[in-house]
Image (spheres, grey):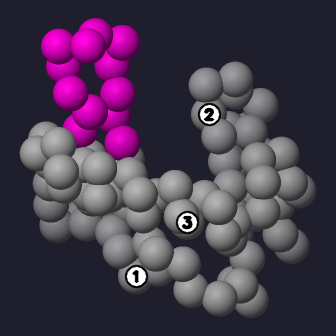
């Protein structure tokens, strides 16, 4: 676990990375039990946002349907709102 904490602490120092960790004693949030989710956004208006769902060691799903991406974005935003804010010290 210390290796994971060190990796997260290092990532927190990057300006382009936001790290938020939901402590284990918090209630479930909209992404509880969902595979890791990434929202990809490129600075080109002709390229829409994409959602990437990863099932580690099994598969990666790339979703580009705007309605589906929006639904995933809403869940991600709600999960971020449930977590302590960026810059909060990592839980022990």
The quadrant of the image that shows the N terminus is bottom right
The quarter holding residue 23 reads bottom right
Q: CA distance from mark 2 to mark 1?
A: 23 Å
The quadrant of the image that shows the C terminus is bottom right
Left or right: 24 as drawn, with respect to 91: left
- The total of numbered circles placed on residues is 3
- The image shows residue 89 at horizontal and vertical percentages of 88, 56
* Residue tagged 3: 79
Q: CA distance from mark 3 to mark 1?
A: 12 Å
Looking at the image, which is closer to me, 33 or 57? 33
Tell me if residue 55 comes above or below residue 17 in the rendering.
below
- Badge 2 crowding class, 10 Å Cα cut-off, few under 14, some 14 to 19, many 20 or more, is few
- The image shows residue 14 at horizontal and vertical percentages of 70, 27
Instruction: Give yes or no for residue 17 being in the magenta stretch.
Output: no
The image's mark for residue 17 is 2
Q: Earlier in the sequence, mark 2 or mark 3?
A: 2
Looking at the image, which is closer to me, 6 or 36? 36
* Residue tagged 1: 33
Looking at the image, which is closer to me, 32 or 69? 69
Which of the two marks, 2 or 3, is nearer to us in this view?
3
Left or right: 80 as drawn, with respect to 34: right
Tell me if residue 91 comes above or below residue 12 in the rendering.
below
- Residue 35 visible somewhere in the drawing: yes
Q: CA distance from mark 2 to mark 3?
A: 16 Å
Q: Earlier in the sequence, mark 2 or mark 1?
A: 2
The residue depicted at 65 percent of the width and 61 percent of the height is: 81
* Residue range corresponding to the magenta coloring: 39-50
Tell me the SS state at disc 3: helix
């Amino acid at each position: 676990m210390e290796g994971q904490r060190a990796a997260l602490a290092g990532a927190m120092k990057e300006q382009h990375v936001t790290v938020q960790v939901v402590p284990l004693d918090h209630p479930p949030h909209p992404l509880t039990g969902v595979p890791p989710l990434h929202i990809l956004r490129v600075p080109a208006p002709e390229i829409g946002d994409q959602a990437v769902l990863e099932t580690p060691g099994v598969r990666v799903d790339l979703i580009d349907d705007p309605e589906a991406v929006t639904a995933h974005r809403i869940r991600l935003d709600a999960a971020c709102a449930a977590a302590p804010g960026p810059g909060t010290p990592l839980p022990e």
